[in-house]
């Protein structure tokens, strides 16, 4: 099911009457009250379970739109939830995010993502959120990023240039984000792609514990995480250069930047579980 077209040119809202509730329904189904109810659980994972050490959070703008571009992890992408939590707790800003189209095949999951601030990964949705002044989290590795085997952890896949085209077209900064620790919470040793197609997803991950231990095997391991927010990057198109060509070049440059950040974070840790 394709995402509905989002009107991008919206006139000023009428002034509210005295005493009128000025809250407006979010175009994508955001539920701020549910987010707040979920926050204590996310905070427990962030502070107690994965004990995430965050650096560079000052690079996240306190106002206005920006693209946060991060490396993806294997199996279930908990790193997205933790990046959102870090920005919520440390920067007091809501971070919206895009999710892959296949998630629409899992209606309850898609509805939950929408309520948490997500939107299907389309250019129209990204433009609408950025024009509304939102922070937007994207994972340019896409499905190949979460399909990495354990032996390929922290080796970034190619970046789709879509985010770079957005940054060039809308003149918004890119904040690179590197996460280390998330790749080990599910040591992926195989992929059941046939079962995945039956369920409407790219694959079902196979780990040393799942599906062998059933539901218990689906519990993420309590690894130690490090998260780094890099300096904002402003993209500038070169005169006479096609935008798509420039976007591809800049996407590769941002990928190299995040890969270098990941390597530096890996060098900092001495133990997967204790940091």
Image: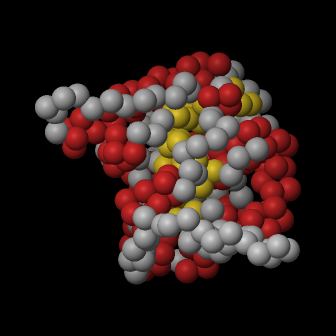
- From the top left corner, tell me how far across and down residue 156 is, in percent: 42, 37
Of the pair 265 and 175, the residue shown nearer to us = 175
Image quadrant for the N terminus? Answer: bottom left
Number of callouts in the render? 0
Which of the colour schemes (rainbow, by chain, secondary structure, one colour) is used? secondary structure
Regarding residue 165, the answer to whether it shows in the image is yes
Query: Is residue 194 positioned above or below 190 on the image?
Result: below
Q: Tell me which corner region of the image, top left, top right, bottom left or bottom right, holds residue 202.
A: bottom left
Residue at (85, 43) in percent of width and height: 48
Horizontal side of residue 89 vs 101, given as left or right: right
Which residue reaches farthest left? Answer: 240
Residue at (50, 67) in percent of width and height: 11
Horizontal side of residue 18 vs 241, given as left or right: right
Q: Tell me which corner region of the image, top left, top right, bottom left or bottom right, holds residue 116.
A: bottom right
Residue at (74, 31) in percent of width and height: 53
Query: Is residue 162 positioned above or below 62 on the image?
Result: below
Image quadrant for the C terminus? Answer: top right
- From the top left corner, tell me how far across and down residue 99 is, in percent: 50, 61
- From the top left corner, tell me how far across and down residue 35 is, in percent: 76, 63
Query: Is residue 104 positioned above or below 193 on the image?
Result: below
Horizontal side of residue 269 vs 4, given as left or right: right
Horizontal side of residue 53 vs 68, given as left or right: right
Residue at (62, 29) in percent of width and height: 59
- From the top left corner, tell me how far across and down residue 170 is, in percent: 40, 45
Regarding residue 77, the answer to whether it shows in the image is no
């Amino acid at each position: 099911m394709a995402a509905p077209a989002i009107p991008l040119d919206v006139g000023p809202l009428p002034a509210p009457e005295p005493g009128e509730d000025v809250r407006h329904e979010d175009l994508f189904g955001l539920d701020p009250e549910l987010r707040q109810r979920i926050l204590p659980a996310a905070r427990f994972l962030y502070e107690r379970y994965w004990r995430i050490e965050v650096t560079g959070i000052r690079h996240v703008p306190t106002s206005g739109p920006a693209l946060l571009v991060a490396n993806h992890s294997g199996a279930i992408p908990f790193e997205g939830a933790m990046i959102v939590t870090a920005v919520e707790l440390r920067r007091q800003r809501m971070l919206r995010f895009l999710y892959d189209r296949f998630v629409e095949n899992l209606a309850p999951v898609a509805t939950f993502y929408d309520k948490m601030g997500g939107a299907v990964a389309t250019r129209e949705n990204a433009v609408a959120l950025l024009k509304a002044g939102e922070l937007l989290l994207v994972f340019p590795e896409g499905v190949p990023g979460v399909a990495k085997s354990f032996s390929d952890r922290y080796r970034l896949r190619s970046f789709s240039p879509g985010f770079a085209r957005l940054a060039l077209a809308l003149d918004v900064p890119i904040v690179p984000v590197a996460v280390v620790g998330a790749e080990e919470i599910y040591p992926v040793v195989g992929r059941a792609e046939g079962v995945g197609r039956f369920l409407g997803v790219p694959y079902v991950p196979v780990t040393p514990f799942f599906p062998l231990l059933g539901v218990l095997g689906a519990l993420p391991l309590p690894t130690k995480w490090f998260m780094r927010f890099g300096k904002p990057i402003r993209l500038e198109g070169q005169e006479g250069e096609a935008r798509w060509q420039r976007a591809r070049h800049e996407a590769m440059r941002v990928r190299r930047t995040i890969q270098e950040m990941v390597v530096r974070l890996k060098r900092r840790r001495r133990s997967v579980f204790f940091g």
